[in-house]
Image (cartoon, grey):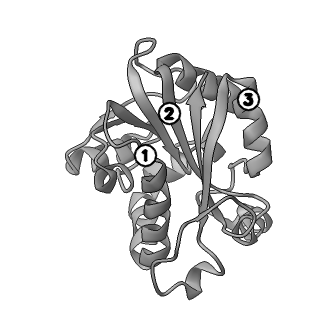
Amino acid sequence: MPKTKPFDLYTEEYDNWFVINEYAFRSELNAVRKAMPAKGDIIEVGIGSGMFAHPLGIKEGVEPSAAMREKAEKRGLVAIDGVAEDLPYPDKSKDAVLMVTTICFVDDIAISFREVHRVLKDAGSFIIGFVDKDSPIGKIYLREKDKSIFYKEATFFGTEELYGILRQTGFKVVETFQTVFGSIDEINKIQKVQSGYGEGSFIVIKAQKI
Protein backbone atom coordinates (compact mmCIF):
# COMPACT_ATOMS: atom_id res chain seq x y z
CA MET A 1 0.00 0.00 0.00
CA PRO A 2 1.36 3.47 -0.84
CA LYS A 3 2.41 5.53 2.18
CA THR A 4 0.03 8.40 1.46
CA LYS A 5 -1.69 9.03 4.80
CA PRO A 6 0.65 11.75 6.13
CA PHE A 7 0.61 13.51 2.75
CA ASP A 8 -3.19 13.43 2.66
CA LEU A 9 -3.45 14.81 6.20
CA TYR A 10 -0.59 17.32 6.29
CA THR A 11 -0.38 18.85 2.81
CA GLU A 12 0.05 22.39 4.14
CA GLU A 13 2.84 21.35 6.52
CA TYR A 14 4.60 19.61 3.62
CA ASP A 15 4.51 22.67 1.38
CA ASN A 16 5.46 24.98 4.26
CA TRP A 17 8.80 23.19 4.61
CA PHE A 18 9.81 24.53 1.20
CA VAL A 19 8.81 28.06 2.20
CA ILE A 20 10.55 27.99 5.58
CA ASN A 21 13.67 26.41 4.08
CA GLU A 22 13.62 28.43 0.87
CA TYR A 23 17.38 28.48 0.26
CA ALA A 24 17.81 24.75 0.84
CA PHE A 25 14.90 24.13 -1.54
CA ARG A 26 16.29 26.44 -4.22
CA SER A 27 19.68 24.74 -3.88
CA GLU A 28 17.98 21.36 -4.39
CA LEU A 29 16.12 22.71 -7.42
CA ASN A 30 19.39 23.86 -8.98
CA ALA A 31 20.94 20.43 -8.45
CA VAL A 32 17.99 18.71 -10.13
CA ARG A 33 18.02 21.26 -12.94
CA LYS A 34 21.66 20.41 -13.75
CA ALA A 35 20.67 16.80 -14.40
CA MET A 36 17.52 17.53 -16.42
CA PRO A 37 17.49 17.16 -20.21
CA ALA A 38 16.87 20.40 -22.10
CA LYS A 39 13.72 19.09 -23.79
CA GLY A 40 11.54 16.06 -24.30
CA ASP A 41 8.53 14.31 -22.80
CA ILE A 42 9.34 14.32 -19.08
CA ILE A 43 7.24 13.08 -16.15
CA GLU A 44 7.73 13.12 -12.40
CA VAL A 45 6.92 10.00 -10.38
CA GLY A 46 5.74 11.16 -6.97
CA ILE A 47 4.85 14.62 -8.25
CA GLY A 48 3.34 15.52 -4.87
CA SER A 49 1.94 19.04 -4.81
CA GLY A 50 4.16 20.02 -7.74
CA MET A 51 6.80 21.88 -5.73
CA PHE A 52 9.59 20.61 -8.01
CA ALA A 53 7.68 19.91 -11.22
CA HIS A 54 6.21 23.38 -11.55
CA PRO A 55 9.47 25.40 -11.47
CA LEU A 56 11.24 22.74 -13.56
CA GLY A 57 8.66 22.98 -16.33
CA ILE A 58 7.40 19.41 -15.93
CA LYS A 59 3.70 19.28 -16.82
CA GLU A 60 2.66 15.80 -15.72
CA GLY A 61 3.29 13.13 -13.15
CA VAL A 62 2.02 10.27 -11.01
CA GLU A 63 0.92 10.72 -7.39
CA PRO A 64 -0.97 8.32 -5.09
CA SER A 65 -2.05 10.97 -2.55
CA ALA A 66 -5.41 12.53 -3.47
CA ALA A 67 -4.72 15.70 -1.46
CA MET A 68 -1.36 16.19 -3.15
CA ARG A 69 -2.85 15.59 -6.61
CA GLU A 70 -5.42 18.30 -5.90
CA LYS A 71 -2.69 20.80 -5.01
CA ALA A 72 -0.65 19.85 -8.08
CA GLU A 73 -3.70 20.37 -10.29
CA LYS A 74 -4.21 23.84 -8.78
CA ARG A 75 -0.69 24.59 -10.04
CA GLY A 76 -1.83 23.69 -13.53
CA LEU A 77 -0.22 20.23 -13.58
CA VAL A 78 -1.65 16.89 -14.68
CA ALA A 79 -1.43 14.57 -11.67
CA ILE A 80 -2.45 10.97 -12.36
CA ASP A 81 -3.47 8.59 -9.59
CA GLY A 82 -0.87 5.83 -9.59
CA VAL A 83 2.17 4.30 -7.92
CA ALA A 84 5.81 3.93 -8.93
CA GLU A 85 5.52 0.14 -9.11
CA ASP A 86 2.78 0.28 -11.79
CA LEU A 87 3.19 3.36 -13.97
CA PRO A 88 0.20 4.22 -16.21
CA TYR A 89 2.28 4.79 -19.35
CA PRO A 90 3.10 2.67 -22.42
CA ASP A 91 6.50 1.08 -23.00
CA LYS A 92 9.22 3.40 -24.34
CA SER A 93 6.98 6.47 -24.24
CA LYS A 94 9.01 8.99 -22.16
CA ASP A 95 12.30 10.80 -22.70
CA ALA A 96 13.00 11.29 -18.99
CA VAL A 97 11.58 10.36 -15.60
CA LEU A 98 12.21 12.34 -12.42
CA MET A 99 11.86 11.11 -8.84
CA VAL A 100 12.59 13.65 -6.08
CA THR A 101 12.40 12.51 -2.44
CA THR A 102 10.16 9.69 -3.66
CA ILE A 103 12.35 6.59 -3.40
CA CYS A 104 12.09 6.52 0.40
CA PHE A 105 8.30 6.09 0.15
CA VAL A 106 7.95 3.42 -2.55
CA ASP A 107 7.00 -0.10 -1.50
CA ASP A 108 9.52 -1.84 -3.77
CA ILE A 109 12.39 0.21 -5.16
CA ALA A 110 13.60 -2.45 -7.64
CA ILE A 111 10.14 -2.86 -9.19
CA SER A 112 9.80 0.94 -9.32
CA PHE A 113 13.09 1.30 -11.16
CA ARG A 114 12.15 -1.47 -13.61
CA GLU A 115 8.90 0.38 -14.33
CA VAL A 116 10.87 3.55 -15.07
CA HIS A 117 13.10 1.49 -17.36
CA ARG A 118 10.01 0.14 -19.15
CA VAL A 119 8.43 3.54 -19.86
CA LEU A 120 11.67 5.25 -20.90
CA LYS A 121 12.69 5.44 -24.53
CA ASP A 122 16.03 3.85 -25.43
CA ALA A 123 18.86 5.85 -23.79
CA GLY A 124 16.27 7.88 -21.82
CA SER A 125 17.24 9.67 -18.61
CA PHE A 126 16.27 8.72 -15.06
CA ILE A 127 16.92 11.50 -12.52
CA ILE A 128 16.73 10.75 -8.80
CA GLY A 129 16.91 13.41 -6.08
CA PHE A 130 17.17 12.19 -2.50
CA VAL A 131 18.67 12.73 0.95
CA ASP A 132 21.64 10.37 1.32
CA LYS A 133 21.22 8.31 4.49
CA ASP A 134 24.99 8.55 5.14
CA SER A 135 25.00 12.37 4.98
CA PRO A 136 24.76 14.68 8.02
CA ILE A 137 21.06 15.45 7.43
CA GLY A 138 20.35 11.85 6.44
CA LYS A 139 21.72 10.64 9.76
CA ILE A 140 19.47 13.10 11.61
CA TYR A 141 16.42 11.94 9.63
CA LEU A 142 17.25 8.32 10.42
CA ARG A 143 17.77 9.04 14.10
CA GLU A 144 14.55 11.02 14.44
CA LYS A 145 12.33 9.27 11.89
CA ASP A 146 9.92 7.91 14.54
CA LYS A 147 9.11 11.49 15.55
CA SER A 148 8.52 12.68 11.99
CA ILE A 149 5.08 13.05 10.41
CA PHE A 150 6.44 12.21 6.96
CA TYR A 151 9.47 9.98 7.51
CA LYS A 152 8.10 7.53 10.10
CA GLU A 153 7.55 4.85 7.44
CA ALA A 154 10.32 5.94 5.07
CA THR A 155 13.25 3.80 3.92
CA PHE A 156 16.45 5.76 3.33
CA PHE A 157 19.20 4.87 0.87
CA GLY A 158 22.86 5.70 0.37
CA THR A 159 24.36 6.78 -2.95
CA GLU A 160 26.43 3.63 -3.53
CA GLU A 161 23.42 1.51 -2.62
CA LEU A 162 21.38 3.27 -5.32
CA TYR A 163 24.19 2.84 -7.85
CA GLY A 164 23.90 -0.91 -7.27
CA ILE A 165 20.10 -0.99 -7.65
CA LEU A 166 20.33 1.09 -10.83
CA ARG A 167 22.85 -1.32 -12.35
CA GLN A 168 20.63 -4.29 -11.45
CA THR A 169 17.59 -2.70 -13.10
CA GLY A 170 19.14 -1.76 -16.43
CA PHE A 171 20.72 1.67 -15.93
CA LYS A 172 24.17 3.20 -16.01
CA VAL A 173 25.06 6.21 -13.88
CA VAL A 174 25.99 9.24 -15.98
CA GLU A 175 26.44 12.04 -13.42
CA THR A 176 26.03 12.69 -9.71
CA PHE A 177 25.55 16.09 -8.07
CA GLN A 178 25.38 17.22 -4.44
CA THR A 179 24.22 20.26 -2.50
CA VAL A 180 22.78 21.26 0.92
CA PHE A 181 25.94 21.53 2.95
CA GLY A 182 25.63 21.92 6.71
CA SER A 183 22.52 22.20 8.84
CA ILE A 184 19.22 23.01 7.09
CA ASP A 185 18.26 25.75 9.57
CA GLU A 186 21.58 27.54 9.05
CA ILE A 187 21.33 27.80 5.25
CA ASN A 188 20.73 31.49 4.44
CA LYS A 189 21.67 31.60 0.75
CA ILE A 190 21.47 29.42 -2.33
CA GLN A 191 24.32 26.93 -2.11
CA LYS A 192 26.58 25.73 -4.89
CA VAL A 193 26.03 22.45 -6.70
CA GLN A 194 29.10 20.21 -6.82
CA SER A 195 29.83 17.01 -8.70
CA GLY A 196 29.98 13.77 -6.77
CA TYR A 197 28.71 12.88 -3.31
CA GLY A 198 29.96 12.53 0.25
CA GLU A 199 29.75 16.13 1.45
CA GLY A 200 26.26 17.41 0.57
CA SER A 201 23.13 15.89 2.06
CA PHE A 202 20.96 16.23 -1.07
CA ILE A 203 22.12 14.09 -3.95
CA VAL A 204 20.97 13.96 -7.57
CA ILE A 205 21.83 10.93 -9.70
CA LYS A 206 21.38 11.06 -13.46
CA ALA A 207 21.21 7.58 -14.96
CA GLN A 208 20.64 6.36 -18.50
CA LYS A 209 18.59 3.42 -19.71
CA ILE A 210 20.74 0.70 -21.27
Residue 161: percent from the left, percent from the top? 79, 43
Question: Of marks 2 and 1, which one's residue comes earlier in the chain?
Answer: 1
Tell me the CA gap for discs 2 and 1. 8 Å
Crowd band around label 2 with a 10 angstrom C-alpha radius: few (<14), some (14–19), many (20+): many
| Residue shown at 68% from the left, 58% from the top | 196
Q: Nearer the viewer, residue 173 or 98?
A: 173
Q: Considering only vertical position in the picture, is 30 above or below 4?
A: below
Q: Is residue 175 left or right of residue 156?
A: left
Q: Which residue is mark 1?
A: 36
Crowd band around label 1 with a 10 angstrom C-alpha radius: few (<14), some (14–19), many (20+): some
| Residue shown at 42% from the left, 54% from the top | 33
Q: Which mark is residue 167?
A: 3
Q: Nearer the viewer, residue 9 or 133?
A: 133
Tell me the CA gap for discs 2 and 3. 14 Å
Residue 182 visible, this orientation: yes
Q: Which residue is mark 2?
A: 125
